[in-house]
């Protein structure tokens, strides 16, 4: 869900994909027209997989397929049967909860700090939340049955995934509390930091409509909050294109929920092994 990275790496862009969120079409087309030729992709690893031993890491690479994550692509709807698990290398995935008689709201992000499909370790092969690609990139994709079988026979992997699920549960609770008690501007800053961590770039594309949907607020509220951040010299924002000007300033403007989510990850997920952190999964 949340993991801080300090590197400023390129973001791989993609095309729009059919999905029930109609606004993704407009976002994706505008994004491609203005940005795809200007951004160069760079290789990024998955921190969760890099926490494994070298043999386990190599096993994952040999049993996975590298795929492109397309902006706006619906990987799963809630309660879908899980056919694949995903380990993002770049780009990121939004996790949304549908609410009766109200717009869906984002509860978390999955980037190269984690995976999509960890709930298989709980013995349930149905997806708990809708999963939509929010930032284009790439991922390692593995057949869910193969992953599940590996969980049954590999204790270190099972322990790692259980630790990750514990982290995710705490982060979901933190985000829920943040949405209830903190001001819109603080929540927007937290969300920008989360996206910045996973975009691996100081530039990424997010419309007012998309941000409002993710935070569960009116579009006009996002316009006001983003305007304040621009006046403070923390970001620039034009036609959905966000440029992070001051990472330090955003961290100072954020509520404590952002740092708390990072801390719980750092305390429970092992740092990348010296044996695995330099392995390129594209080799």
Image (spheres, helix red, strand yellow):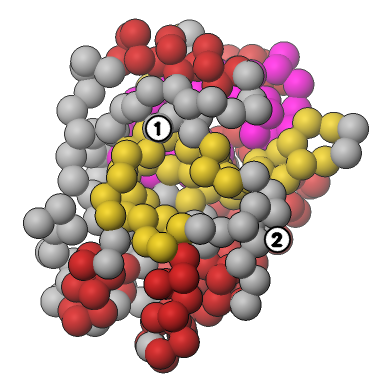
Spot occupied by residue 118 in the image (x, y as percentages of width and height): 52, 67
Q: Is residue 108 left or right of residue 37?
A: right
Image coordinates for residue 62, horizontal then vertical, percent: 21, 67
Element at badge 1?
loop
Total labels: the figure holds 2
Residue 144 visible in the current orientation: yes
Q: Main secondary structure of the magenta part?
A: helix
Crowdedness of circle 1 by 10 Å Cα count: few (<14), some, many (20+)?
many
Helix, strand or loop at mark 2: helix
Identify the residue at horizontal 48%, vertical 51% (top origin).
Answer: 110
Question: Looking at the image, is 104 positioned above or below residue 108?
Answer: above
- Choose mark 2 or mark 1, whichever is in front: 1
Circle number at residue 173: 2
Q: Is residue 217 magenta?
A: yes
N-term-proximal mark, 2 vs 1:
1
Image quarter hosting the C terminus: bottom left
Image location of residue 204, percent across then percent down: 39, 26
Identify the residue at horizontal 21%, vertical 15% (top origin).
37
Q: What residue appears at the point 70 percent right and 61 percent down from the top-left corner?
A: 173
Judging depth in this view, the residue of 183 and 1 nearest the camera is 1
* Residue matched to label 1: 70
Looking at the rendering, which quadrant does residue 132 occupy? top right
């Amino acid at each position: 869900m949340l993991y801080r990275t300090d590197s400023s790496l390129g973001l791989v862009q993609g095309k729009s994909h059919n999905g029930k969120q109609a606004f993704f079409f407009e976002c994706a087309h505008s994004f491609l027209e203005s940005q795809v030729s200007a951004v160069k992709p760079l290789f990024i690893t998955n921190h969760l997989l890099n926490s494994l031993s070298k043999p386990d890491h190599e096993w994952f690479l040999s049993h996975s397929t590298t795929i492109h994550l397309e902006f706006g692509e619906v990987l799963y709807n809630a309660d879908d049967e899980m056919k694949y698990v995903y380990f993002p290398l770049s780009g990121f995935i939004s996790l949304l909860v549908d609410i009766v008689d109200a717009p869906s709201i984002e509860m978390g992000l999955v980037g190269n700090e984690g995976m999509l499909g960890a709930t298989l370790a709980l013995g349930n092969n149905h997806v708990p939340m809708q999963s939509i690609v929010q930032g284009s990139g790439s991922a390692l994709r593995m057949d869910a049955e193969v992953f599940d079988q590996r969980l049954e026979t590999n204790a270190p992997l099972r322990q790692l995934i259980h630790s990750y699920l514990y982290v995710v549960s705490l982060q979901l609770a933190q985000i829920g509390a943040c949405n209830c008690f903190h001001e819109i501007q603080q929540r927007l800053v937290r969300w920008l930091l989360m996206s910045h961590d996973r975009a691996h770039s100081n530039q990424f594309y997010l419309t007012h409509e998309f941000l409002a949907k993710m935070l569960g607020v009116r579009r006009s509220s996002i316009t006001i909050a983003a305007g304040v951040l621009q006046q403070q010299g923390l970001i620039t924002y034009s036609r959905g294109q966000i440029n992070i000007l001051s990472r330090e300033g955003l961290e100072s403007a954020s509520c404590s929920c952002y740092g708390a989510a990072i801390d719980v990850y750092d305390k429970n997920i092992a740092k990348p092994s010296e044996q695995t952190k330099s392995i390129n999964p594209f080799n």
